[in-house]
Image (tube, coloured by chain):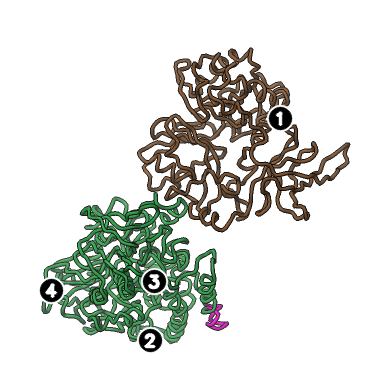
Chain colours: A brown, B green
Amino acid sequence: MLARDHFHHAVCETPFHPRTAALNQLNLWHRWRDHTVADAYFDVGMEYNAIRNSCAVFDLSPMTKHLITGPDSLAFMNRLVTRDVAKIKPQRVGYSVWCDDAGQVIDDGTIFHLREGVYRLCSQERQLDWLHTSALGFDVRIVEETNEVAGLAVQGPTSCAVLKAMGLTGVETLTPFGLRDYPFAGGVLAVSRTGYTGDLGYELWIEPERALALWDALFAAGHHHGIRAIGTMALEMSRVEAGFIQAGVDFLPADRAIRADRTRSPFELDLGRLVDFSKPIFTGRRALLEEQERGSRFRLVRLDVEGNKPAKDAYVYDQQRRNIGVVTSSMWSPAAKASIALASVKMPWGAPGEQLLAEIYYQKELKWNRFMAKCRVVDGAFFDPPRRRQTPAADR
Amino acid sequence: MTEQQSVIVIGGGHNGLVCASYLARAGRKVLVLESAAQPGGAAVTREFAPGYSVSAVAHLLHLLDPGVERELGLARHGLAYAKTGLRTVALSPDNPPLILNDGEIEGGEVSAADRLGLRAHTARMRKFARVIARQHGRIPPRLDFKSWSDALPAAAVALDIRLLGRRDMREFLRVATMNIFDVLEEQFENPLLKGALALDGVLGTRLGPRSGNSVYAALYRQSGSVNGRPGALALPRGGMGAVTTALSAAARGVGAELRVGARVDEIIVSNGRATGVRLQSGEVLSADMVVSNADPKTTLLGLLGARHLEAEFARSVHHVRATGTAAKLHLALSAVPRFRGLTADQHGERLVIAPDLEYIERAFNPAKYGEYSPHPVMEITLPTLHDVSLAPPGRHVLSAVIQYAPHDLKGGWAEGKQRFQALVMDLLEQYAPGIGALVQHSELLTPADIEQQFGIAGGHWHHGELALDQFMMLRPVAGAAQYATPVAGLYLCGAGCHPGGGVMGSAGRNAARVILGGR
């Protein structure tokens, strides 16, 4: 165990803090897993536009990271998560969820298969306790390494060009969910073609000592490609447009729930594709098999909402005005030119194409208005540009 | 069913043999695998010194399921009793002993109030124990009540309690979760009497008289009967092994195959289903289902492996409390020892060293911290006074349960065993002066020895602490309390399941019922 003094501080700074602080003209910060991170630097709209039109850089160092090694690492990972980890080859990344025995989602995250049998699990929530619980009977070593790995998301249509300009030769050939190591400043820079924006983009992983050098190299290379630091507000817009869910927002982590009907299964989060019943065992399997036979209780839907008012926290109704669910994320989407929302509705409602209603309250000059907005259940992401998957990636 | 379904039973203890018999009787092709050279598990009579044999672990029979005894025809298969209705003799270092016989006190200096009190207490505990006894043959409900078959047994428990009558129901609900120390302090004056009664609440458990669940443990202990007499104690002729010898004969009689010297190393799982076992020899045996008489931890975390279970379930099995604190002492004696204050014929009773409540609690204290008792409590029998077959002519055997000797002894038992045995002999010498000189051979089984020799994780007789949080639908854990495990084709049938330990057979009988499709 490393000797740490973090408990002396109410909040920690990320390795990029000297740079992000200098850029944060709004001086807007919030806490993410005990680290201070920027909400926005100068203008949320411009930051959002960097994601969709040029190159956005987001400091994701506080992302929880665990390193899993040992002879049983693959067996352990496969028992932990719902998908088949054997299919994630070395130098590949996979998105998955993990559940409790009741088949309710504890968290979602990405599995980085760094080298044969060496995995890094990145998640929103801290998972050490659950990982140790799950490790009973497995010969694995689990190390929390959140603070040992600094991370930057580099996202947007010019992100590949920026990385090439920075000297990452051949990065355009990296396929989505690919992972590649580059030498950098005497160390190793790991580049994965992953992200939370639903756009062309990469995530860069480096030792904290080289973090500032990386930032400087990146911004120097990106000068002519519209590079811009972005905060969580702009990132949030892009992830809702991409239709991605967030722990604690679109679902309640099962280990935090007290009431049984507040949790969700992978099927109920539209993540059934991540559940691989061909694996003989994984935590939640029995319950999920039962759910598959019995039917789910809820469904996650993506709503195209009438008008331009975000359906924040709106109740969702069917045509008979029966309350059938609630909006969990909502926004005006500049890319889709529509008011969009993610919602959790009771089954059997929410089939693609179904017309529902969202009860929207909004204030105009201190007067509250109520508006029953028509919504249509859409299939898939609100914004899904071909450049997201195109390989080789556009590098100009 | 067109083809005969094959079943492997891991472990030929009494529950394994009972389960095997019922399954074979119903037409299953049953193979029982026992690692030792003789079937019987921990319910065996073993020769511990040339010519001297003794019940290796449990030495008094009091919980044997009457249904099992009748349905499997154990008497026909040779089970007989050398003695039933043993009295309890409470030994005191300074005062004359008390002799307790079915709620009556013989001899001793006991007040009239205590005599009356004991009668009432015994009657009440018997009545309460019947509530526990009625659950023995029931398949516990699932906690999430998936069907009426779950709701019914739960309702039946409630009804059994209600049928005690208003006054007794209230008293039952009041005392059931109390500790035996407080319950006895409320009712009795005589320290020796209280000590002897408290022993029933802690014997074979990791409890002291002041521990929660000690009333439940006492009720559990009294929930059996011998020849229809509730709460009675018996010595099977030929020792405890006579029970499993009869059970083996019964099992073979209905076509079950018994293989001894076959130690199972691994339960083989293929595609999420138990399909057989691998023996220590490397031999692989296949079957349509596997039933384990081994304790839940050994079965699920050892033979099967946590990797075949979901994480929370594996964690709950890992947390089953099953740490033994009872050691077993066997002495080969050249003559009958003389316990102070006892007449010659009283030596054949159940002798207990538990002179007062605080003595027992103080004996328990060190066990909490991984140390043995400097002044232990004991339950002693001299079975050869009723059954000469166990020793050479004129020679005798002493069999004693000794507490507290925690499985997790600090420094380990390799270090501590000699010292503990010397200390136990010193204590015996106080109560039976000259006994040391009679000892020809001796054997002390610590919980570590019991774990190693009988394959019981933690060396706990009951395969899991007797406690309300490990009772019925929580025994061994929710999710496996109906004898089926989460792994298809793998069942539990041992004392770690409802209703629990003691040479009883109910778990094996209930498991067979579930496997055969009934409830």
Instruction: Tell me which corner region of the image, top left, top right, bottom left or bottom right, holds residue B155.
Output: bottom right
Q: Residues within 10 Å of mark 1 (few under 14, many from 20)?
A: some
User: Please, is residue B479 above or below residue B71 in the view?
Assistant: above
Decide if residue A272 is in sight here. Answer: yes
Give the main secondary structure of the magenta stretch: helix
Disc ID at residue B516: 3
Query: Which of the marked residues, 2 or 4, is nearer the chain's N terminus?
Result: 2
For the residues labelled 3 and 2, the Cα–Cα distance comes to 44 Å
Along the horizontal axis of the image, is A155 left or right of B356? right
Tell which of A64 and B275 is nearer to you.
Answer: B275
What range of the chain is rendered magenta?
A: B161-171
Q: Is circle 2 on the same chain as circle 4?
A: yes
Task: Select label 3 or label 2 by which is in front.
Answer: 3
Disc ID at residue B334: 4
Quadrant of the image containing the N terminus of chain B: bottom left
For the residues labelled 1 and 4, the Cα–Cα distance comes to 97 Å
For the residues labelled 1 and 2, the Cα–Cα distance comes to 90 Å
Q: Amino acid at mark 3?
A: Leu
Q: Chain of mark 4?
A: B
* Percent position of residue A58, x then y: 61, 26
Q: Amino acid at mark 4?
A: Ser
Q: Which residue is mark 1?
A: A335
Q: Chain of mark 2?
A: B
Name the secondary structure under disc 3.
Answer: loop
For the residues labelled 3 and 4, the Cα–Cα distance comes to 51 Å
Q: Which residue is mark 2?
A: B104
For the residues labelled 2 and 4, the Cα–Cα distance comes to 34 Å
Q: Is circle 3 on the same chain as circle 1?
A: no
Q: Amino acid at mark 1?
A: Ala
Query: Which of the marked residues, 3 or 2, is nearer the chain's N terminus?
Result: 2
Name the secondary structure under disc 1.
Answer: loop
Instruction: Tell me which corner region of the image, top left, top right, bottom left or bottom right, holds residue A384.
Output: top right
